[in-house]
Image (tube, rainbow, N blue to C red):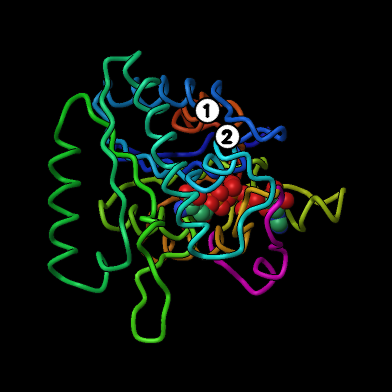
C-alpha cells in the first residue's frame, strides 16, 4: 500500500470522457451522471470551486439519432453534436437540480486563447460563475462552429487538452480526468495484458510518450496521447492532475483525501 498523497485542492476541474458517459450498449450511463452530480454538488457546497469539462455531445447525439458509427463528414459530426449537447445538458440539469444546483453551459473555441477580448470575456464569465453559490459551469468545445483551416483554427480538437487549458485559465489546483481505465499503464492494456499502472509521473519523458496508445472504445477519441499532452500543460504550470477510472465518481472524494488512486501527474515528490 502506497503512502497517502498530499493533495491540496480548493479549485478543481473535473473532466469526464465519452467512454465513461456512454455504456457499451450505446445508452447514456445515468448512474455515473447522477453520482457525478452528487459528488460535485457536495464539493461546491463544502466551499470548493468546481468546473466540469464534459465530452459526450457526439456520443450522446449518436445514441439519440440511432447512429452506429461516428460520422466521418465534419458537417454530420457538427449536427450530431448539436443534438447530443442539448440532450446532455438536459440530463445534467436534472441531475444537479436534485441537489439544489444549477448548471451553466460554456461552449468554447480556441478564440479564447488567440484573441485577448475573447480571453477576457471567458475569464469574466468563469469568475462570475465560480462566485455563485449554487452553480456548476459545464464546459465543452463548441463543436458546431469550430473549424480547422489554413488561416483559421478555432478547434481545440479534444477535451483532454481543453480541460488542461481550462485548468490553467481558471488557475485551478487540480485536474481530475475521469476515463474508462484506472490510470496510465506502462503500455496500452488492450494490447499488453500484463502492463502495470504507473502511480506517479513528474515528467513526460520519451518512454512515457512511447507507452501511450490510442483510444479504447468506439466513443473515445484521443486515447492516452492527448491525455499526456494535457498532463504536459498541467506540469508546465506547476499544477496537478489525477487520471483515474470514472465508473464510480465518488472516487473523487478518495482522491481529495490523499488516497493513492490512479496516476498522479505532479512535480511534487
Ligand atoms: N498506456 C496506456 N495506459 C492506459 N490506457 C491506455 C494506454 N494507451 C492507450 N490506452 C487506451 O486509452 C483509453 C482511454 O482513452 P479514450 O478512449 O480516449 O477515453 P476518454 O473517452 O476517457 O477520453 C483506454 O481505454 C485504453 O484503451
Ligand atoms: N467535444 C466532443 C468531445 C471530443 C473528445 O475529446 O472526447 P473524449 O475523448 O471522449 O474526451 C464531444 O463532446 O463529443
Prevailing secondary structure class for the magenta stretch in the rendered image:
loop
Q: Is mark 2 within 8 Å of ligand 1?
A: yes
Q: State the residue at coordinates (43%, 51%).
A: 240
Secondary structure beneath dot 1 equals loop
Q: State the residue at coordinates (21%, 24%).
A: 134
In the image, residue 205 sits, relative to residue 125, either above or below, namely below
Residue 155 lies, in percent from the top left, at 40, 67
Q: Within the magenta stretch, is there residue 212?
A: yes
- Of 268 and 228, nearer the camera is 228
- Of 191 and 109, nearer the camera is 109
- Quadrant location, the N terminus: top right
- Of 235 and 187, nearer the camera is 187
Residue 121 lies, in percent from the top left, at 14, 57
Secondary structure beneath dot 2 equals loop
Q: State the residue at coordinates (34%, 38%).
A: 9
In the image, residue 221 sits, relative to residue 203, either above or below, namely above
Residue 267 lies, in percent from the top left, at 47, 58
Q: Which residue is mark 2?
A: 246
Q: Is residue 151 left or right of residue 217?
A: left
Q: Is residue 109 left or right of residue 77?
A: left
| Residue 201: mark | none
Q: Is residue 36 left or right of residue 214?
A: left
| Residue 249: mark | 1
Q: CA distance from mark 1 to mark 2?
A: 5 Å
Q: Which residue occupies the extreme bottom position in the image?
A: 150
Total marks placed = 2
Q: Are marks 1 and 2 in contact (CB under 8 Å)?
A: yes
Query: Which stretch appears magenta?
Result: 202-217
Q: Within the magenta stretch, is there residue 262?
A: no
To which quarter of the image does residue 207 belong?
bottom right
Amino acid at each position: 500500500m502506497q503512502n497517502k498523497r498530499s493533495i491540496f485542492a480548493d479549485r478543481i476541474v473535473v473532466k469526464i470522457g465519452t467512454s465513461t458517459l456512454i455504456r457499451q450498449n450505446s445508452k447514456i450511463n445515468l448512474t455515473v451522471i447522477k453520482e457525478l452530480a452528487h459528488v460535485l454538488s457536495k464539493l461546491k457546497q463544502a466551499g470548493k470551486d468546481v468546473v466540469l469539462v464534459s465530452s459526450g455531445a457526439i456520443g450522446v447525439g449518436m445514441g439519440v439519432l440511432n447512429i452506429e458509427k461516428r460520422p466521418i463528414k465534419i458537417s454530420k459530426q457538427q449536427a450530431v453534436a448539436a443534438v447530443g449537447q442539448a440532450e446532455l445538458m438536459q440530463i445534467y440539469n436534472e441531475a444537479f437540480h436534485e441537489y439544489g444546483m444549477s448548471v451553466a453551459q460554456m461552449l468554447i473555441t480556441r478564440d479564447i486563447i488567440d484573441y485577448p477580448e475573447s480571453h477576457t470575456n471567458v475569464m469574466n464569465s468563469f469568475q462570475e460563475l465560480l462566485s455563485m453559490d449554487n452553480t456548476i459551469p459545464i464546459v465543452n468545445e463548441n463543436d458546431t462552429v469550430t473549424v480547422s483551416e489554413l488561416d483559421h483554427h478555432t478547434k481545440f480538437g479534444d477535451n483532454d487538452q481543453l480541460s488542461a487549458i481550462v485548468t490553467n485559465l481558471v488557475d485551478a489546483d487540480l485536474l481530475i480526468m475521469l476515463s474508462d481505465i484506472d490510470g496510465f499503464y506502462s503500455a496500452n492494456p488492450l494490447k499488453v495484458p500484463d502492463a502495470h499502472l504507473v502511480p506517479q509521473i513528474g515528467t513526460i519523458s520519451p518512454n512515457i510518450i512511447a507507452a501511450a496508445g490510442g483510444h479504447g472504445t468506439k466513443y473515445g477519441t484521443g486515447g492516452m496521447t492527448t491525455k499526456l499532452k494535457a498532463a504536459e500543460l498541467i506540469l508546465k504550470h506547476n499544477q496537478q492532475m489525477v487520471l483515474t477510472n470514472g465508473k464510480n465518481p465518488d472516487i473523487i472524494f478518495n482522491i481529495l483525501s490523499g488516497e493513492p488512486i490512479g496516476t498522479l501527474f505532479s512535480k511534487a515528490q
